Amino acid sequence: MMTLPARWAAQWARSPSAPAMRFGDGPWVSTAELNQRSATAGMALSGLGVAAGDRVLWSATTSLPAVVAALGVLRLGAVLVPVNPGYTRAEVAYVATDARAACAIVEGAEARGWVAEAAPATQVLDLSLEPRVRTGGGPGDPSPLLDGAALGDPALIVYTSGTTGRPKGAVLTHANMAAGVECLVAAWGWGHDDRLLLALPLFHVHGLCAGLFGSLTAGAPAVVHERFSPGRVLAAAGDVSMFFGVPTMYHRLAADPGCGELRSLRLCVSGSAPLPIALFEALAARTGQRVLERYGMSETLLTISNPLEGERRPGSVGLPLPGVELELDGGELWVRGPSVFAGYFERPEATAEAFTEGWFHTGDLAAIAPDGYVTILGRAKDLIISGGFNVYPAEVEDALVRHPAIREVSVAGSPSEEWGEAVTAWIVTDGPAPSVEELGVFCAGSLAAYKRPRLVRVVDSLPRNAMGKVLRHELR
Ligand code: MLC
Ligand code: AMP
């Protein structure tokens, strides 16, 4: 097994004129150009004092310079820490300080200022990798060894709240990343002739590892869209062979009169949230596609998938991918395998709590049929999944309870056809109740847009158990 950057560099050198990716309708970027530009990025970072093993926060919308910067980080052996570019000051500052980032590559000028203020030792760069806010760092090696990371070295730190608490950085090693990506390439028969239409955000493992790194590893071109739009996806469908999406994207595609355009694709994959059986069936009827549903997590990458050949069972996430072992503990799914992360960054206690003898506790409730097919039944953890983004009720409650008219609040997901779950706040008020719009404005400074409540319900009191803990399931 090789690290992914070493494998990509070897493949790029072998076939330098192959198309690697294009952005929208832009020109194709060849593997030679990607090779050269990502090497230049790695060397530029090194020249600024970033060393192998350093953590590099990376926050940008999807673009070629953003991809080049991320590949440069990995080729240098530094550790990529992706952050949603829609995050507020507090959210970005938390990750920058928790990760103790040596460097931050940040697209937005305002967000660069937030990082510089919160983490003065962090070298803050824009996407051209020019220092924009002179702070930490210093001259480094201008001719570093690229693609020299070892398999056991950390490659990626993905912030997630796991099953409980404040966001923690899940550390994925190069070995985890290679195992998690290579098994998808094999399982889904991903060859040079494929072309992936990639409209997922690149700051989560779905878009980054499965989508972008999968394409690079398969040696297959990707057509990358900066953001998802059903019309643009359907217009591009004739030019690609695969599409990966979250259920909200499939919901919007199924509602589009042009959704039959998906018929020509070889493979459509769904994940990150449950794909409702009715939506699976609507897509099958309208497009002929039996969408392949798979399951994963930031901490484990993708571990369970319906088969490429054989039965794609609606409502089930399929069978464990090669090398993955599954177990149920009191209904909770535990997983073990080569793509399961090394632990939470500098949090030995949280790591110890998340594992039992190498088995990672997913916090998801599942059933395994006698023929091995897995169905995700629900969650043991307090987590809302809205449009494929995770929202932690406690974080939303902390923001809302600061509102002067809110005496008590509890947040949970309500069923939503479009979003899967819609963030909903049950509030007990003092005086007139604030509207959903007013609460949106109120928490705009502390919560990214997708975390803000879409529904507000005013109640006289919150249901609690004998210990005083709010019974969220009774609210739902
Ligand atoms: C956007 N908004 C959301 C939202 N996405 N609100 C709730 N939930 C979401 N998921 C907000 C916008 O900020 C905007 O707010 C308003 O909703 C309307 O936006 P929109 O234009 O309709 O939404 P859009 O930008 O089109 O985004 C929808 C989406 C996006 C589905 C394309 O949410 C998305 O890309 N989801 C993918 C998430 C993903 O990649 N998850 C993978 C996690 S990895 P306002 O206030 O401006 O009006 C993982 C592991 C695994 O889970 O197994 O894969
Ligand atoms: P994240 O922390 O963003 O990686 O999200 C991981 C969570 O997404 C898992 O723990 C599941 O709850 C959920 N998830 C991912 N894929 C699926 C799926 N196909 N069906 C149901 N839930 C899923």
Image (cartoon, rainbow, N blue to C red):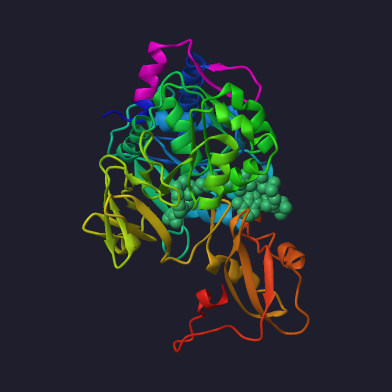
Q: Image quadrant for the N terminus?
A: top left
Relative image position of residue 202 (x, y in whole percent):
53, 39
Q: Nearer the viewer, residue 425 or 419?
A: 419
Q: Image quadrant for the C terminus?
A: bottom right
**Residue 14 found in image quarter:** top left
Residue 17, magenta (yes or no) = yes
Q: Is residue 401 visible?
A: no
**Residue 235 found in image quarter:** top right
Q: Residue furthest bottom?
A: 466
Q: Nearer the viewer, residue 265 or 12?
A: 265
Q: Residue furthest right?
A: 432
Residue at x 35% of width, y 52% of height: 374
Relative image position of residue 301 (x, y in whole percent):
39, 44
Q: Residue furthest left?
A: 357
Residue at x 63% of width, y 67% of height: 424
Relative image position of residue 336 (x, y in whole percent):
27, 50
Is residue 15 toward the left or the right of residue 130 in the image? left
Q: Give the magenta range.
A: 7-29
